[in-house]
Image (cartoon, helix red, strand yellow):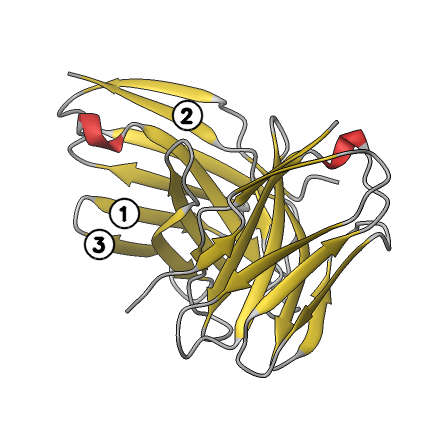
Amino acid sequence: KAGVTQTPRYLIKTRGQQVTLSCSPISGHRSVSWYQQTPGQGLQFLFEYFSETQRNKGNFPGRFSGRQFSNSRSEMNVSTLELGDSALYLCASSSDRFSEQYFGPGTRLTVT
Amino acid sequence: DQQVKQNSPSLSVQEGRISILNCDYTNSMFDYFLWYKKYPAEGPTFLISISSIKDKNEDGRFTVFLNKSAKHLSLHIVPSQPGDSAVYFCAASGGNFNKFYFGSGTKLNVKP
């Protein structure tokens, strides 16, 4: 079974630009969650999608948004990038509640 | 608001000995807990989970203990191996589906 894939793996953007990150979950998994990892902060929950609906949301500004398609693939968008948005963005998929989440390798975003 | 805390940023253990990684949480609604291992440049890898109806779960060399009254869980690795050297994250969820709160991680170094 193929794992969670994320594209692109690395990205460099300029302040004020916007960016879209993509995540393909494990086949059959309907839940996709996004996390931001910064040094010393651990993983911060962004949002979770299940069957194309946002089911949970973390404490991030509205510049961070996402969506999920009918094939469970998910995209995350960050608009008006700030320097502080530089981080590793991780996507995780699971079949549902009380199921472990499987993580992709992440997208390393650098904002200059 | 850090609802899940890993107070030891690093731990060094001799090969063959026991590694004990600790995690504390504040939210009594949490009912599902997981441990992940993370190598540099990779996404976290699921290790072991425990639900609040249990106080212990074992999988090979890995055992997770849950003390609900103390809001504390721990991961025991016996015997520790150099390949176990990585950053370990604990995560917790409850109430909301699949909204996980992660600790800041403990870097384990197993010396040969």
Residue count near mark 2 (Cα–Cα under 10 Å), binned few <14, some 14–19, many ≥20: many
Dot 1 amino acid type:
Thr
SS at circle 2:
strand
Q: State which quarter of the image contains the C terminus of chain A.
A: top right
Dot 2 amino acid type:
Lys
When the figure is inspected, residue A56 is found, relative to residue B81, above or below; the finding is: below
When the figure is inspected, residue A35 is found, relative to residue A76, above or below; the finding is: above
Residue count near mark 3 (Cα–Cα under 10 Å), binned few <14, some 14–19, many ≥20: few
Pointer 2 and pointer 1: residues touching (CB < 8 Å)? no
Position of residue A70 measured from the top left corner of the image (x, y, whole percent): 59, 83
Pointer 2 and pointer 3: residues touching (CB < 8 Å)? no
Out of B68 and A39, give the one closest to the viewer.
A39
* Residue depicted at x 47% and y 67%: A25
Residue A92: mark: none
Dot 3 amino acid type:
Asp
The residue singled out by tag 1 in the image is B63
Q: Disc 3: which chain? A: B
The residue singled out by tag 2 in the image is B107
Position of residue B26 measured from the top left corner of the image (x, y, whole percent): 65, 46
Position of residue B112 measured from the top left corner of the image (x, y, whole percent): 15, 16
Q: Earlier in the sequence, mark 2 or mark 3?
A: 3
Q: Answer whether residue A15 is visible to the viewer in this image.
A: yes
SS at circle 1:
strand
When the figure is inspected, residue B31 is found, relative to residue B70, above or below; the finding is: below
